[in-house]
Image (cartoon, rainbow, N blue to C red):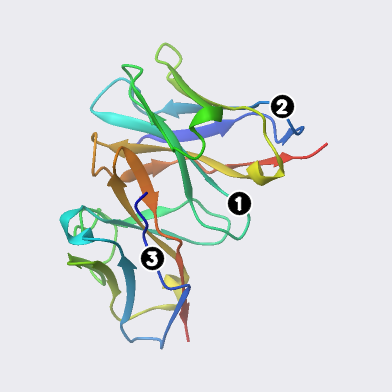
Amino acid sequence: QVQLQESGPGLVKPSQTLSLTCTVSGGSISSGSYYWSWIRQPAGKGLEWIGRIYTSGSTNYNPSLKSRVTISVDTSKNQFSLKLSSVTAADTAVYYCARSTGYSSGWYDYWGQGTLVTVSS
Amino acid sequence: SYELTQPLSVSVALGQTARITCGGNNIGSKNVHWYQQKPGQAPVLVIYRDSNRPSGIPERFSGSNSGNTATLTISRAQAGDEADYYCQVWDSSTEVFGGGTKLTVL
């Protein structure tokens, strides 16, 4: 059974960089044609896709966040990571990592439990 | 950018059928996936590729997709079905989620 677990600071100061890591267990991050994504959800609001990475290193990003987002993968550690720069209070949200199937038209079959990141001084 | 429109809320009487819609331009040409999210929990996939149920999801959950509307149908609604529901598609190298629908079981 695949499991995903987010980790990282729960509090980030405005203008700094938010950094989160997702550790995958129960299977290799390199096996199969899966994409590894970050999705966030502000309190009381809907889901917002941030971006994804394939184990080859190929990425896709939400155009609205693209200038501030970097997603990377470390196959040796079975992890992938998110960096979001120049954060503001609007970036306060629960951040989820998730696995999707296939290049396009894929669905999210495994999710992490989510981690709350608050942007505040 | 592609947009998905969901009603903010849907109410259904216990034991009756709930229908949650997801509107988008020619959405019938896309694969639509649906997620259930209960308070404080991560979303759970309930329908993939328009009408397929993952293992463990009750047969009461079904989906359809045609024209400009995809629909998630929950038959014989139970109190445990009360949750937020989100539709999702892939468009122009971007994942798109609908705004979510809160299902209330009366």
Residue lying at the far front of the rendered structure = B1
- Disc 1 marks which residue? A42
Residue placed most toward the observer, A63 or B44: A63
Q: Residues within 10 Å of mark 3 (few under 14, many from 20)?
A: some
Question: Neighbour class for label 2 at 10 Å: few (<14), some, many (≥20)?
Answer: few
Front-lying residue, B71 or B104: B71
Q: Position of residue B52 (x, y in %)?
A: 19, 57
- Left or right: residue A104 compared with residue A93: left
- Count neighbours of disc 1 (C-alpha within 10 A) and say few if under 14, some if 14 to 19, many if 20 or more: some
Label 3 marks a residue whose chain is: B
Residue type at mark 1 is Pro
The quarter holding residue B68 reads bottom left
Q: In screen coordinates, is A119 left or right of A22?
A: right
Hey, what amino acid is under mark 3?
Thr
Q: Are both tags, 2 and 3, on one chain?
A: no
Q: Which label sits on residue B5? A: 3
Q: How many marks?
A: 3
Q: Secondary structure at mark 1?
A: loop
Mark 2 chain: A
Kind of residue at badge 2: Gln
Q: Which mark is residue A16?
A: 2
Q: Secondary structure at mark 2?
A: loop
Whether the residues at callouts 3 and 1 have beta carbons within 8 Å, the answer is no
